[in-house]
Amino acid sequence: MIRRADIILKGRVQKAGFRDHIDEVAYDLDIKGWVKNLEDNTVKIVCEGKKESLDEFITRIHIKEYPIRVQEAIVEFSPGLGEFDDFTVHATYERMDAAGRYMREMNRNLGGKFDQMLDKQDQMLGKQDQMLGNQDKMLEKQDLHIEITRNGFDDIKEEIKTGFHDVINEIKDVKNEIHMQRDDFKEVFMKEVTELHNEINEIRSTLARMQAAG
């Protein structure tokens, strides 16, 4: 059964790419109708669809994701009239809508990049833990050699001495490798941070130019 919903959305809902988001959700749920900005800074939607689709539609558009913040949704239901063939975004195109949508997408991308950086850090720390574990094994080997020496096996003293130097060299190699891994991680991390900073500055400059042009 087709139902009709008249919806008024209040909050930070204009010039933030919100109508494009509403249009996308309506398309996904096969909702027909229209959306437009009102002069009182609210957004009005008149739409028709199945009851479960309308319920999900209302839930998905009631968002608080920068730069959109829906503070209140007033909804009135009535029987569907079947007067709509598609979903339409009324009023003229506003550049700030596109800018707001782009900003929301960039926020998601930045979060993904931070997650990737944290994954890389975890991988490097895992390698360091592995190297430290190898170092512990070598120290245990050294302790074993010392214990054998204490028990009076004079015939392997020279072997212990040689093995001791080998262990020391291995420990030095491990330490050097740990330092190199830390330096590599620092370089990668700073590069990623610089790239993110540049992207954010670019977004700010783009928004400033768009606002000045508008």
Image (cartoon, rainbow, N blue to C red):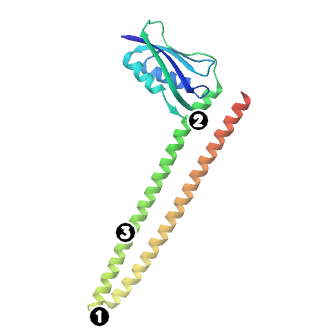
Q: Report which residue position mark 1 lands on.
A: 154
Q: Amino acid at mark 3?
A: Gly
**Among numbered discs 3 and 2, the one appearing first in the sequence:** 2
Against 70, residue 116 (above or below) is below
Residue 33 placed where, x, y %? 50, 13
Q: Which sits in the foreground, 39 or 145?
A: 39
Q: Relative to residue 179, is residue 160 drawn left or right?
A: left
Q: Report which residue position mark 3 lands on.
A: 133
Badge 2: residue crowd in 10 Å (few <14, some 14–19, many ≥20): many
Q: Amino acid at mark 2?
A: Met
Q: Report which residue position mark 2 lands on.
A: 103
Q: Please identify the quarter of the rendering in which residue 82 is found.
A: top left
Q: Amino acid at mark 1?
A: Asp
Against 124, residue 135 (above or below) is below
Residue 78 placed where, x, y %? 43, 10
Task: Mark 1 and mark 2 in contact? Answer it, CB < 8 Å.
Answer: no
